[in-house]
Amino acid sequence: MSADQACLRCRRQKRKCDKILPRCTLCKRLNKPCDYLLPVQAPRLLPLPDWADLTPSNLRHTLGAQVSLIVGDGLQLQATTALYFRTVHTWFPIISETCYNIRLSNVRVQTATVPSDLSFLTLCMALVCKEPVGVELPLSTRSWYASLKSFVALLEAMGTNSLEMLQGRLLLTIFEIGHAMYPAAYVSTAANVRTAISLGINAPCDDPRKVFRDPQKAEEAQQTWRGIAITDRSDLAPEDAHQIVSILKQEHLVDMSRWKMAKHPDTEDCPKVKMDPFTKLAHASQLLNQVLVHIHLTKSHSLFDGIEAVQILKSLTSFLSTFQSGDFNPHPLSDSALAICRSAMLEALEVGSHTYIPDNECCIHTSLNILKSLVYEITREAETSPSSEMAALSVFLPHCLYKAAMVCLNDTRLAGGVDPEPSMRPLKVLLAYLGMRWLAAKRYLAKVETAQETYNL
């Protein structure tokens, strides 16, 4: 694909531009941002694919060329994949680094071109590492994202479906969640579930070799299915639409009971059992989903189940205790599972503290006290500097900070005569910091500031 006009950088410096999208050759060679200013003009027809051109070899060649153009070859490709495994992979380990590198090296030795699904996965790995510039994604990144969404449709039309393609689609969903791209993130999440079912990845994890004979591939498939379940349960949109979507998750044709997760203990046994970070993240997302369904039933049908509410809080409290180590309190940006678990606790306590329970005002006061204590804990931890590099920050972190800020703001509004800024400032600073990695955090920060202006606080 090529643009009608030279890119802005080439035009400013009066250089000859080859107009290649999404990044011209000169800007790519100089490692500079490349944006095209599309002039205001009358609507024009976009090119549509010709079915005669949609052959496996053409798609394979096109995707391979995109990898060379956008990511690069040789050392550039190694650097890009190394960045992915050093950052995103640390909190969302759905791809085996060893298996990926072996597949890539074997393909380059044995064949002239890389398979379409592996090229697609490589492009998605590179895309999810891209950071916004200012308050939005660069035009080149948005064009890259749109191209990958188009390739999903083209590969589907050709009947391509593989674990590598599903992993790429899941990374696209993470990109959409992180940059608050809705409803695209919701649609992608649902499509990932269906795609996984068609591959048989949702098979019981106690015998994954029934689908994948290679044990390493079976482990990758299990991690991918776990990642799909996490995104399905933990997608807390800045627009608050998650409270509607959460009930639909209970009606999915996915039998989550099949996902037994042999590594998952009962919640009450959590403090006694050591879990790896991704298992913890999956368990936290499961608890969050229970909370959102409970909230939906309480608000929509005026059905408050006190026994269920107490059990949920016991489960959350038990799970939160697994993150404590003596006097050490983890930083709010250090752990995705901790952030999701705290989001679940904040959501549950906020509803519990505002739900009238006949003859049981003690429960309401207890919920309020625990809620204030948790917000204070998060605010105090937010005053310390984050230890993780920005590129390694997870998409699941912002909501916890946002919810804590909103609870703090609401408490101040009800109390009256108190300046909320000293308490909220650390949370807002962290949201602004997260916003340099994921635009969803900027959306949350904007909501906090809008609420602050509305309440005149």
Image (tube, rainbow, N blue to C red):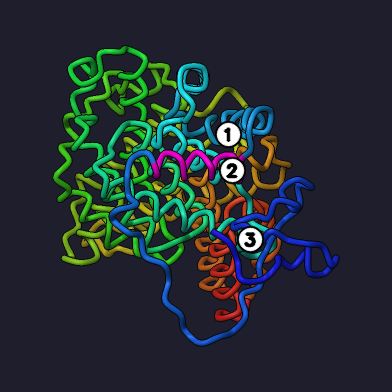
Q: Which residue is mark 1?
A: 84
Dot 3: what SS?
A: loop
Earlier-in-chain disc, 2 versus 3: 2
Q: Is residue 286 above or below residue 183?
A: above
Dot 1: what SS?
A: helix
Q: Is residue 27 above or below residue 71?
A: below
State the image quarter where residue 280 is shown.
Answer: top left
Q: Nearer the viewer, residue 223 or 393?
A: 223
For image coordinates 78% across by 69% down, the residue present is 11
Per the rendered image, the range of residues in magenta is 58-71
Q: Label for residue 138?
A: 3
Residue type, label 2: Cys
Earlier-in-chain disc, 1 versus 2: 1
Report the residue that reaches farthest toward the front: 52
State the image quarter where residue 256 is shown.
Answer: top left
Pointer 3 local density, CA inside 10 Å: few below 14, some 14–19, many at least 20 = some
For image coordinates 22% across by 25% down, the residue present is 260
Residue type, label 1: Tyr
